[in-house]
Image: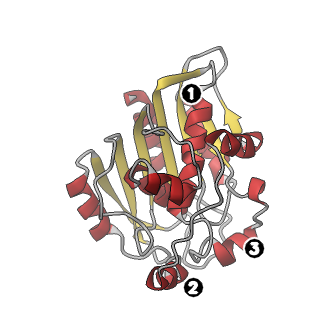
Amino acid sequence: MSLGIIALIWALMGASMPAAAETLQDRVELLAPHFSVTRPEGDGPFPVLIMLHGCGGPRPFLDHTAEAAMRAGAAVINVDSYRPRRISRVSALATVCTGARLQGRERAGDLYAAMAWARQQSWADRTRLSAIGWSHGAWTIMDALALRSGAEMQRATGLEDLPDEPLEGLSAALIVYPYTGIGSFAGRREWRLAPRSTAIIAQHDYIVGQTRSALERQRLRSPSLDLVLFEGATHAFEDPQASDPRVRYNPAATAREHTMIRDMIAAM
């Protein structure tokens, strides 16, 4: 079943259910014990890269990505959105990957919380914050940029005390093979901020399907967004342990992605 089928059903039924209300600090306290932090030696301050996994949950390749970013001089906060919610991989594949649970606009609250936590850390350079998301994580970043401040943002994320701009300090984003279908704001709204952003499109992505048209529309609304086609690459091309027949590990594409991450960090 594709990522957006149940999201489509919900949209047709008008079932945009608000998340249970909590404070931003509540979300920080929920997530922070499960952050995996990798940072260079020393006191900093370091540029920060916040990582958001795909709908299947954290995968081993994210550890290698964090290591590459750390070697480039960044502190990395790898956000596990599932463990604090007790979402197993099996449950995630059945519910999150089908759009029935934790859609991008709700998970945007996790990015807001990670940003808030990062700004509290003495080793973090609050002026050089960035984010990278894969698939569902990329959807999350785009929706986090598109939500309207105030009531809509609070209703979508369930966070009742958000500041007007919870992404303050976000200077760059890397959006990797994003979901852009029903339930996503991709291509439908201008972003509140204009971080230097790049979307990686996998040429043979048969999981999220065709995304280029939505991303082209988003680029018209948000000129800070660049699009890069990875020819020959599939969804999750970084994952040598993927069991999905639609996925092929591509070491050259993975190395290219790591180079883009290093370049993003250097430009912050």
Local packing at callout 3 (Cα closer than 10 Å; few below 14, some 14-19, many 20+) is few
Residue 134 seen in the figure: no
* Residue 231 found in image quarter: bottom left
Q: Residue at x 59, y 44 (%)?
A: 65
User: Could you tell me which quadrant the N terminus lies in?
Assistant: bottom right
Instruction: Give the CA distance from mark 3 to mark 2.
Output: 14 Å
Q: Earlier in the sequence, mark 3 or mark 1?
A: 3
Q: Earlier in the sequence, mark 2 or mark 1?
A: 2
| Depth order, front residue of 238/200 | 200
Instruction: Give the CA distance from mark 3 to mark 1.
Output: 34 Å
**Which residue in the protein does label 2 denote?**
1
Query: Which mark is drawn over residue 90?
Result: 3
**Which residue in the protein does label 1 denote?**
119
Q: In front of the other: label 3 or label 1?
A: 1
Secondary structure category for the residue under label 2: loop
State left or right for residue 247 relative to residue 34.
Answer: left
In the rendered view, tell whether residue 86 sits above or below residue 35.
below
- Please state the horizontal and vertical placement of residue 122, each as a whole percent of the image: 63, 18
Q: Residue at x 48, y 39 (%)?
A: 166
State left or right for residue 225 relative to residue 10.
Answer: left
State left or right for residue 188 relative to residue 79.
Answer: left
Secondary structure category for the residue under label 1: helix
Q: Earlier in the sequence, mark 3 or mark 2?
A: 2
Q: Residue at x 43, y 39 (%)?
A: 164
